[in-house]
């Protein structure tokens, strides 16, 4: 936490955001149980699709920093893998460690819950927040599903009894309802300080990393239970070349060669599909998403390879970019 003693606590009732002339900057961890809409909310707050989402729990596997530069300051959002209890394999241990250590490093924790729901997993996330002692705000998401909004009042009351949140904001990440209000409350809760990133920077992640994520998103979204969530993507090469064409003369084209790692031959067959149609569709959609996010033309080649049970092998994890924690 970077809050200083000299700073007035102004995130209480009636706060209308950063005072005129003041500039705020700080890190905000977006946490909550899997599938509550953390990544969707981050994308909404950034106005761009940076974090990948799907209806599958544990889609988010890496922490990702999203930079939001506003008139009143800069908010540095950290999207985390869920704090979840299950699984004792290497990948799960890594995910839990990563999410926990972030809670103590940030200026504010934004807990995301689903409107009218509070499960054991939500309680687990809240317990971790309380243990870290970092100021926390709660975003009550998916309010678009609640027709009668007065039902939110007793729910908010019960949340306030669980933890001294600095603020509670009902939102719909999907529709964008009340997201600006949330943003104002988040900014007001951050310490004063200069911007830490250039105003036009969106993330600390490279295009190479984002390319792998966007391809993985297609796999998560397109294949159901047939694929284990540990299916992973590796970018074998990423090069920029001057495109001969005239459609995007301003930016060099990215030439990307990607590998999809699976654990069994049967999974490889599913991903590739009949005559390669499934893989072609996934790769083509991923390519379009890359072009949108990068603002450049993308040439994408994808292969699928079988690698035996890498998810329980720490060395294999490290070779795929996990294990910084
Ligand atoms: P995460 O695991 O917490 O990052 O959750 P995601 O952002 O990946 O979202 C999980 C699922 O919930 C996806 O299918 C989203 O489309 C959906 N979702 C997220 N936010 C909302 C919302 O505000 N309303 C509704 N109805 N669905 C949402
Ligand atoms: Mg996510």
Image (cartoon, helix red, strand yellow):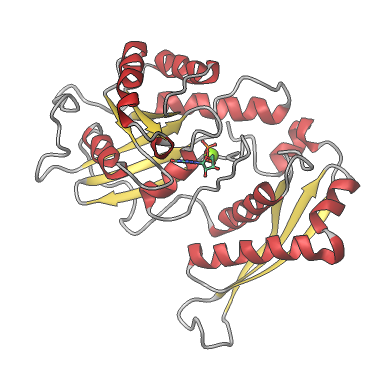
What x and y, as percent, mark residue 218? Answer: 65, 54
Quadrant containing the N terminus in the rendered view? top left
The number of numbered discs placed on residues in the rendered structure image is: 0
- In this rendering, the answer to whether 21 lies above or below 157 is below
Residue nearest the viewer, comparing 260 with 117: 117
Q: Quadrant of the C terminus?
A: top right
Q: Residue furthest top?
A: 161
Rendered residue at 53%/76% (across/down) = 252
Residue pictured at 30% horizontal, 56% vertical: 199
Q: Position of residue 131 (x, y in %)?
A: 43, 13
User: Is 149 displayed left or right of 299 in the figure?
Assistant: left
Query: Which image quarter: residue 186?
Result: top left
Quarter of image, res 116:
top left
Toward the right, the furthest residue is: 265
Give above or below for 98 relative to 48: above
Residue lying farthest to the left in this orientation: 20
> Residue 320 in the image: x percent, y percent?
70, 44
Q: Nearer the viewer, residue 299 or 278?
A: 278
Q: Residue at x 62, y 66 (%)?
A: 287
Picture quadrant where residue 308 is located: top right
Tell me which residue sits at (30%, 31%) in the image: 169
Is residue 245 shown left or right of residue 23?
A: right
Q: Residue furthest front?
A: 148
Please say if 204 is above or below 122.
below
């Amino acid at each position: 936490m970077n809050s200083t003693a000299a700073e007035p606590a102004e995130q209480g009732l009636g706060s209308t955001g950063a005072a005129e002339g003041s500039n705020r900057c700080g890190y905000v961890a977006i946490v909550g149980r899997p599938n509550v809409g953390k990544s969707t909310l981050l994308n909404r707050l950034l106005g761009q699709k940076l974090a990948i989402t799907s209806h599958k729990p544990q889609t988010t596997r890496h922490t990702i920093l999203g930079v939001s530069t506003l008139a009143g300051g800069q908010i540095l959002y950290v999207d985390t893998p869920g704090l979840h209890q299950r699984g004792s394999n290497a990948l799960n241990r890594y995910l839990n460690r990563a999410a926990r250590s972030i809670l103590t490093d940030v200026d504010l924790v934004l807990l995301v819950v689903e409107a009218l729901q509070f499960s054991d997993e939500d309680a687990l996330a809240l317990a971790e927040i309380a243990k870290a002692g970092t100021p926390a705000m709660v975003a009550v998401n998916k309010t678009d599903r609640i027709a009668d909004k007065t039902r939110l009042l007793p729910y908010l009351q019960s949340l306030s009894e669980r933890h001294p949140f600095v603020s509670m904001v009902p939102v719909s990440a999907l529709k964008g309802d009340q997201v600006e209000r949330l943003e104002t409350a988040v900014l007001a809760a951050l310490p004063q300080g200069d911007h830490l990133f250039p105003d036009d920077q969106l993330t600390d992640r490279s295009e190479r990393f984002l390319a792998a994520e966007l391809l993985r998103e297609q796999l998560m979204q397109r294949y159901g239970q047939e694929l284990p969530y540990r299916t992973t993507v590796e970018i074998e090469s990423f090069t920029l070349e001057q495109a001969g064409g005239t459609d995007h003369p301003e930016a060099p084209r990215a030439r990307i060669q990607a590998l999809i790692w699976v654990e069994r031959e049967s999974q490889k067959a599913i991903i590739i599909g009949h005559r390669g149609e499934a893989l072609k569709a996934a790769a083509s959609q991923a390519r379009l998403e890359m072009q949108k996010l990068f603002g450049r033309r993308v040439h994408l080649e994808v292969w699928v390879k079988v690698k035996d049970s890498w998810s329980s092998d720490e060395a294999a994890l490290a070779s795929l970019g996990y294990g910084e924690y």
